[in-house]
Amino acid sequence: MPLVSELELPAFDYFDPDMRGPSFHAAMAELRSHGWLATSPLGPFVLDRESADLFLRTRSATFPGLKIAELFGIEDGPLFEEMRRNILHRNGEDHRRLRNLVAPAFTPRAADRWRPAMRAFLADLWEAVRESGRCDFVTALARPYPSLTIARVMGAPLADAPRLHEWSEWIQRQFDAPSLTNERDRIERAVVEFYEYAGALLAARREEPGDDLLSTLLAAEAEGDRLSEVETLHLVLNVLIGGVDTTQSQLAHAIRLFAEHPEQWELVRERPELVPAAVEEVLRYEPITPFTARILHEDVEHRDVLFPAGTVVMVCAFTGNRDLGTETESERFDITAGRGR
Ligand code: HEM
């Protein structure tokens, strides 16, 4: 059985700065037309839905967070500490324990608690642009909205939302190879500043609990087990960096897609019950995390190809999400097609 590294495969240049917007779409379609595998300096890319499913679900693989640290020579310091403790990089029993402890704070019902505050933020942001009838959506809404929400969830002063936004944007760049190479100092500084800020907030909540996520996590208990202070700090950091940049970018793409497909926007206006399906279709059609990665802990055989232990497999949601029905159907942005899940 051939090793994946021995196959003649089309190459994908992950580091090409022009790989965005329509050129990204065209490059992905071209790659997919050659088959289900591509090669890159990071490792093989799997492009189809079935393979993506296999590599994301297998117990033989985990997210290669610490491999990324190793590849970029990050061996100590605040960013290394952040990577080591990130829930995304913690596996097995350790991961399950953290998930058990935090799960009650992240149920749909727990999220409902924040909806009135979220609606109020949107109403305020909308009010500021309503009269002029036009705005730059990113500046006016997509950018400020997630950090205001996370500030509220954290119990931080709303005036600090812009600082939270800035830290989130920098710390999130640990997933961007060029930034990790060229801007590491700035990322490290953001981690240190956030540690200081959230540490002070945590100390205050320990003294005087409130109705925020920090107080909930400090009180969280499962089978007699509790989160330590450092674990709580990192979970809050994960919520900040996981929730701000992602939501901002996905919201921006959502509005762009509806601007390009006004008939779909009309459907949402006429039938607001379509909103959940619209969210799923946006995530399917233009996922702002078009790739993720897994590192294999044992050999995996798939379609007569051997992926040896230690391989970093890049899993492509962008192309996988288009493996539904015929090519023309999958390329169509359609919130009524029920393809989002
Ligand atoms: C549209 C918005 C979002 C997108 C596109 C997104 C994307 C993702 C993806 C792709 C992963 C999985 C990575 C992998 O396993 O390979 C992930 C994990 C995660 N996300 Fe999000 N995310 C979004 C919003 C949020 C929000 C709002 C929060 C926090 C409130 C958050 C916190 C997390 C955390 C903590 C993990 C790690 C979970 C674990 O390993 O158990 N994300 N996100």
Image (tube, grey):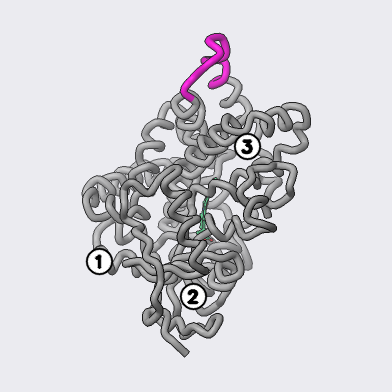
Cα–Cα gap, marks 3 and 2:
35 Å
Q: For marks 1 and 3, give the one nearer the viewer.
A: 1
Q: How far across and down, in percent of the image, does residue 212 sit? A: 56, 40
In the rendered view, would you say 31 is above or below 259? below
Q: How far across and down, in percent of the image, does residue 73 sit? A: 23, 65
Q: For marks 2 and 1, give the one nearer the viewer.
A: 2
Cα–Cα gap, marks 1 and 3:
38 Å
- Residue in the picture at 48% in, 44% down: 246
**Residue that carries the numbered disc 2 in the rendered image:** 61
Q: For marks 3 and 2, give the one nearer the viewer.
A: 2
Q: How many numbered marks appear?
A: 3
Q: Quadrant of residue 86?
A: bottom left
**Which span of residues is magenta-colored?**
124-136
- Residue in the picture at 75% in, 32% down: 272
Q: Is residue 64 magenta?
A: no
In the rendered view, would you say 169 is above or below 60? above
Whether ligand 1 has any atom under 8 Å from the Cβ at mark 2 is answered as no
Q: Is residue 126 magenta?
A: yes
- Residue in the picture at 33% in, 65% down: 68
**Residue that carries the numbered disc 3 in the rendered image:** 114
Q: Residue flagged by tag 2: what amino acid is it?
A: Ala
Out of 272 and 112, give the one closest to the viewer: 272
What secondary structure is found at the residue carrying circle 2?
strand
What secondary structure is found at the residue carrying circle 3?
loop
Q: Residue flagged by tag 1: what amino acid is it?
A: Glu
Determine the residue located farthest toward the top in the rendered image: 131
Q: How far across and down, in percent of the image, does residue 199 sit? A: 38, 46
